[in-house]
Image (spheres, rainbow, N blue to C red):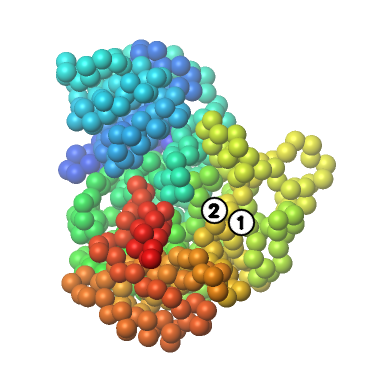
Amino acid sequence: MSSTFLLHDLIAASARRTPGAVAVGQGKAELCYGELEHRIAGFAGFLLDLGLARGERVAIFLDKSIDTVVGIFGTCSAGGVFVPVNPVLKPEQVCHILRDCNVRTLVTSHERLKLLAPHLPSCHDLRQVVLNAQEAPADSVAAGPAVFGWPNGSAGATLDRHRVTDSDMAAILYTSGSTGRPKGVVLSHRNMVAGAKSVAQYLGNHSEDVLLAALPLSFDAGFSQLTTAFHTGARVQLLNYLLPRDVLKALRDFRVTGLTAVPPLWIQLSQLDWPQSITEHLRYFANTGGRMPRETLERLRSRTPHSRPYLMYGLTEAFRATYLDPDQVDARPDSIGKAIPNAEVMVLRADGSECAPNEPGELVQRGALVAMGYWNDADKTAERFKPLPPNAPGRQPGLVLPEMAVFSGDTVRRDDEGFLYFIGRRDEMIKTSGYRVSPTEVEEIVYATRLVAECAAFGMPDETLGQSIALVVAAPDDAELDHAALLAECRKRMPAYMVPARIAPYRDALPRNPNGKIDRNQLGAWLHDTLRP
């Protein structure tokens, strides 16, 4: 495992150790490590035959599949940069990504290509399309990029690869765009390999694990299921699910040992009846992409009491930042834990000095997982990626070259024992009656009432209070929202300044962004229109 420097080395190393072990599954189809490495080599040679230059971007716009995995790692092996595109995106969103990072090669399906075709003329850098079918249909595109079928075998696999080091680009992952146009986060081979090793270490992943890839592979936490599995020689089972029950079925049918998901999915799963057999093999469940309500955590632990819960915090710009050891969950369930292996997390004031215990400050991360910046966006990169302050921990005065750290924009505090607690995003904090209120704090209390299925808190302009608190809620399944009971529970459990001034019932499940998180941008716009006089 220690000889892996480049992303595709993870598969090659496992193929050398256990070539016959299953690497990836899709439904009932399976591919062992030896065959996966062979297919990756063939796809890399195919891209080189097409003229792929070092560092050129290759977009992968497919559902989760074995072909998707081959396309991603084949691009890396050839010396290119893969750009995974979330399959739920609309053509206009897909083409924004293709234009933004100057994609030259698009890997997709015939059906998806037909949807994209009217928009492709705006993608001026796109030169070729590879379809996940053996032959390219003649009517794929009326005009524009050349269209090729999926390579058969390992033709071209002996071609020389481009020289690549671990500091070269490996991927561009686009953020969900909840605060505007999605930004492309550039990750190096070093970022992704270090991330795989770090996550596998604290989760205790090993070759007997079966990891369920339920999150989009365009999401860093979703892609992490591939890299941690391949690093340890484990199996990853790909799942394109429609309903939360599909996830439970996959957990049972494939005897999954590890599942990572985001809070909205965990909330839905916690409200279902779990097959008893899952608790026999699910070794851990992990949360990322936002705070898991304590009520949800308690329900999950009751459904699978032998599984270890990992509460994690991270950002695409640095892959992963912290985790809470399962042994600490009962003592401090509200904590996001401590820094993951091979990373350092600091809590800094605006002047760059370190905060005192329990003093709120900005979470700043340094180390091998810090990304290379935003693609083609110097201004936004300068806002988030900054030199580590001279007086920050780990920065010695004799060093001349700057070290870049990522400034998260999230407000946290660190207790006397070094455990971190999330307070909120600076741009989401609600300022009401002279208090600063975190939306997650409000939501946590509301979930504990068990009177809602989902909720989201927002600050609304108020001439007297500065902002008042508005709560959007989705009623429990097959039940009407009891507005009076919910408000009474809020008054019982919250200080007066935190009680929502308005409660707005939402007609359905709360909207999601492409990564499965609650889309606060869309929901905030809906709330503004709903409450407008």
Comparing 269 with 20, the one in front is 269
Estimate the x, y position of residue 93 in percent, counting from the top left: 35, 37
Residue at horizontal 77 percent and vertical 47 percent from the top: 390
Gap between marks 1 and 2, in whole Å? Answer: 9 Å
Q: Mark 2 or mark 1, which is nearer the start of the sequence? A: 2
Comparing 61 with 143, the one in front is 143
Residue at horizontal 26 percent and vertical 15 percent from the top: 143
Instruction: Judge whether 387 appears above or below 164 on screen.
Output: below
Instruction: Judge whether 105 appears above or below 326 on screen.
Output: above
Residue at horizontal 54 percent and vertical 37 percent from the top: 374
Q: Is residue 454 visible?
A: yes
Mark 1 crowd level (few <14, some 14–19, many ≥20, 10 Å Cα) = many
Residue at horizontal 44 percent and vertical 24 percent from the top: 102
Q: Is residue 301 visible?
A: no
The quadrant the C terminus occupies is: bottom left
Estimate the x, y position of residue 231 in percent, counting from the top left: 43, 42
Q: Which residue is mark 2?
A: 321
Point out which mark residue 95 bears: none
Comparing 226 with 265, the one in front is 265
Quadrant of the rendered structure where residue 103 is? top left
Estimate the x, y position of residue 387 in percent, counting from the top left: 70, 42
Quadrant of the rendered structure where residue 457 is? bottom left
Badge 1 vs badge 2, beta-carbon distance below 8 Å: yes
Q: Which residue is mark 1?
A: 363
